[in-house]
Image: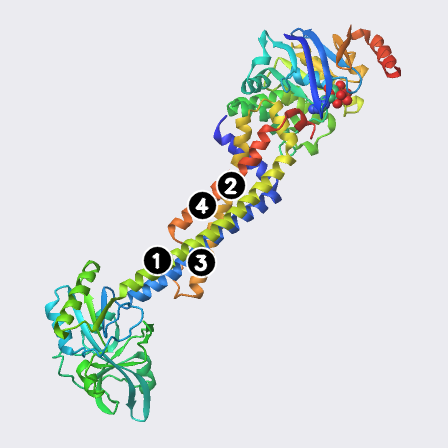
């Protein structure tokens, strides 16, 4: 007997009991849709975080004044030396693995245009910062390339800062006051949102020397170092550390890698997706038990039919194959429908929350299909075997 | 040829053995028409099931066409049922979701016959039982007599040598019962070995021989036209 004939026979007995078939189909459908939706959400969350980090710039080292043993809490061990612009220049000059170096100075102060004034974060840095942090400029340009110590009176405004201060007026070329000092607006950042706890939409960026003068600072807040490649990161970290120890005659700085944070997050979220997938797999198993119940009912309802088949000279293997085919048909059909529904739901979700790049990982889709068919066949096995073991005489008598 | 030698079938009910058949020895030649009669619980169906290879005797030997059936494996017994034996039951046992044609086609599907051959045989078999016009009907659209005729077509479509019928007319009115019996006679005339279990003297009357079972033993063998003797004996049995 050909497989296609078994297939037809199984399909016919499924369509012949449409309510029962529909119910067990529903179970598998929900299970598979759950796998697709849940893993898509988990994967979406993971990608969201990864993207957030990636938009901060990659392969970054952050040099922080003050020594701390663990990178968790930055307690000072004694009074640290200043972290200076010369330090930053030395890193750029002497650490070959360092591709870009951006010194950073920070303060909160007022930016004013005529009567409008606004309290914002004022960040002093160099042109390298833009590449390292991957900031987009909406209008005008970023900081000019100039000698680090010079500090010309120019400022770049964040998207929101520019809107609040200027309304509809074009800000580029206008003079604003930053902490009371007149500065020319040379550029406006594109909308960036919050990155690493920093609101880049409400910000004023000035040359680092300008900021240090403005706020009367001797020490930098941070030095951002971007390595050429991920593989250079550890080397760069050691070299930067060693260089600064040499220059300061003590270890009074801390160098952390942002990627360490990223990979931790990545791992955590990967585990989350897996856990979510496991939950979904459990719901699939529940669907499998549903199939088993339906198949058991099917077998006991069709006892007479099975007895008849035996009397007609249908072999055990054929009966087993017929019932297993039924289970596999239900579960694969349910799997496909569930996949479609899950996919639709994910599309709707992405529509509603475009920020979340929710999409089911391929492994989850494949696993959902394989598991659903596997579950169908596995749980169909018990009833199918029961069918083959029925005593034909008792079965025919309906016992 | 069916040859039963000292067949015993004992069922274990709790710790109580039930002797359904006791030392049954009987030979049925090819093309014979045999009726099995006897009171309820006398072992008629049990005997038929053993002959049909649906059940195995507790002891004794059963040779079918010279082959010892007792030593056959399950798969081989399946094969015997598929090719050499046809069954007709009191309750028809048609599959309700399948049409008349599909019900008749069923054994051929599982036997792996090619589609064209199956279609040809379905037509001939349903034609032979006078149901060409009902080919696409489902069982619930057929009368009892028609259902049994579909079952008869199904039982013979694999062209078996032996047809076993357990109370084939038990659920039919006398008119449609007669139509079924006429068909059975016709097939028997064409060489089919026919064994019919029945309570009905009118059914048994058509047989070449009648075997009477009482309490699992063969009590009597008579010619079909000597049915009167049997009836008297069975009446006596009921009193006793
Ligand atoms: N599976 C079984 N388990 C236990 N006892 C059984 C089983 N099958 C049959 N018997 C017993 O064997 C005896 C013979 O049963 P069988 O069905 O052959 O009788 P029968 O002659 O066909 O009766 P009827 O005319 O009522 O159909 C009965 O006593 C019955 O109770
Ligand atoms: Mg009986």
Q: Disc 4 vs disc 1: which is toward the camera?
A: 1
Viewer-nearest of discs 3 and 1 = 1
Q: Earlier in the sequence, mark 4 or mark 2?
A: 4
Image mark for residue A346: 3
Residue for badge 1: A267
Q: Residues within 10 Å of mark 1 (few under 14, many from 20)?
A: few
> Given the image, what chain letter belongs to the residue carrying mark 3?
A
Alpha carbon distance from label 2 to label 3: 25 Å
Nearest to viewer (mark 2 / mark 1):
1
| Residue ranking furthest to the front | A78
Q: Secondary structure at mark 1?
A: helix
Q: Mark 4 touching mark 1, by CB under 8 A?
A: no
User: From what the image shows, is residue B56 above or below residue A213?
Assistant: above
Secondary structure beneath dot 3 equals: helix
Q: Are marks 4 and 1 on the same chain?
A: yes
- Give the residue at x 44% y 58%: A346
Sequence-wise first label, 4 or 1:
1
Circles 3 and 1, Cβ within 8 Å, touching? The answer is no
Q: Are marks 3 and 1 on the same chain?
A: yes
* Camera-side mark, 2 or 3: 2
Where does label 4 land, which residue?
A: A369
| Residue B53 to residue A196: above or below | above
Nearer the viewer's eye, disc 3 or disc 4? 4
- Between A208 and B233, the one lying in front of the other is A208
Q: Chain of mark 2?
A: A
Q: How far apart are the alpha carbons under marks 3 and 4?
A: 17 Å
Same chain for labels 2 and 3? Say yes or no.
yes
Instruction: Indicate left or right for A359 with A165 as reference.
Output: right
């Amino acid at each position: 007997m050909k497989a296609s004939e078994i297939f037809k026979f199984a399909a016919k007995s499924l369509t012949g009991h449409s309510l029962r078939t529909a119910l067990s189909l529903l179970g598998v459908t929900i299970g598979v849709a759950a796998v697709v939706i849940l893993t898509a959400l988990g994967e979406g969350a993971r990608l969201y975080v990864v993207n957030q980090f990636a938009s901060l710039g990659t392969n970054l080292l952050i040099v922080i004044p003050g020594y701390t043993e663990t990178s968790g809490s930055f307690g000072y061990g004694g009074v640290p030396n200043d972290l200076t612009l010369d330090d930053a220049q030395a890193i750029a000059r002497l650490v070959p693995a360092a591709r870009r170096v951006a010194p950073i100075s920070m303060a909160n102060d007022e930016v004013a245009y005529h009567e409008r004034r606004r309290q914002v974060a004022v960040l002093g840095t160099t042109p390298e910062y833009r590449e390292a942090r991957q900031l987009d400029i909406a209008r005008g340009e970023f900081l000019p390339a100039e000698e680090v110590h010079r500090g010309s009176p120019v400022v770049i405004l964040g998207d929101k800062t520019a809107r609040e201060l200027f309304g509809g007026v074009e800000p580029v070329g206008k003079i604003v006051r930053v902490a009371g000092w007149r500065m020319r607006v040379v550029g406006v950042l594109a909308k960036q949102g919050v990155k690493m706890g920093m609101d880049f939409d409400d910000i004023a960026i000035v040359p680092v020397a300008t900021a240090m003068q403005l706020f009367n600072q001797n020490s930098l807040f941070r030095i951002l170092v971007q390595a050429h490649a991920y593989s250079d990161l550890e080397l760069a970290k050691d070299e930067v550390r060693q260089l600064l120890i040499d220059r300061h005659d003590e270890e009074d700085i801390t160098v952390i890698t942002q990627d360490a944070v990223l990979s931790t997050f990545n791992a955590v979220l990967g585990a989350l997706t897996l856990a979510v997938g496991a939950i979904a797999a459990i719901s699939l198993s529940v669907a499998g038990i549903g199939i088993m119940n339906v198949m058991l009912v099917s077998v006991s309802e069709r006892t007479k039919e099975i007895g008849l088949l035996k009397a007609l000279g249908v072999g055990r293997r054929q009966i087993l194959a017929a019932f297993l085919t039924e289970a596999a048909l239900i579960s694969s059909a349910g799997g496909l429908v569930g996949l479609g529904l899950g996919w639709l739901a994910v599309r709707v979700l992405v529509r509603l929350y475009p920020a979340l790049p929710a999409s089911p990982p391929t492994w989850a889709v494949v696993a959902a299909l394989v598991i659903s068919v596997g579950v169908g066949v596995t749980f169909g096995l018990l009833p199918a075997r029961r069918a083959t073991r029925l005593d034909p005489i008792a079965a025919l008598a309906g016992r | 040829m069916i040859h039963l030698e000292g067949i015993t079938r004992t069922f274990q009910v709790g710790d109580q053995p039930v002797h359904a058949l006791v030392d049954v020895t009987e030979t049925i030649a090819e093309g014979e028409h045999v009726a099995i009669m006897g009171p309820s619980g006398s072992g008629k169906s049990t005997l038929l099931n053993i002959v049909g290879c649906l059940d195995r005797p507790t002891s004794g030997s059963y040779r079918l066409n010279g082959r010892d059936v007792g030593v056959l494996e399950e798969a081989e017994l399946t094969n015997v049922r598929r090719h050499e034996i046809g069954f007709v039951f009191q309750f028809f046992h048609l599959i309700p979701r399948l049409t008349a044609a599909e019900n008749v086609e069923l054994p051929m599907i599982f036997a792996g016959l090619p589609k064209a051959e199956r279609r040809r045989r379905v037509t001939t078999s349903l034609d032979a039982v006078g149901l060409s016009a009902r080919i696409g009907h489902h069982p619930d659209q057929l009368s009892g007599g028609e259902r049994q005729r579909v079952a008869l077509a199904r039982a013979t479509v694999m062209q078996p040598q032996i047809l076993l019928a357990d109370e084939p007319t038990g659920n039919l009115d006398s008119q449609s019962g007669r139509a079924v019996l006429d068909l059975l006679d016709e097939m028997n005339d064409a060489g089919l070995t026919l064994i019919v279990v029945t309570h009905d003297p009118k059914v048994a009357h058509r047989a070449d021989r009648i075997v009477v079972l009482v309490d699992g033993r063969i009590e009597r063998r008579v010619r079909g036209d000597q049915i009167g003797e049997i009836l008297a004996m069975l009446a006596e049995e009921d009193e006793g």
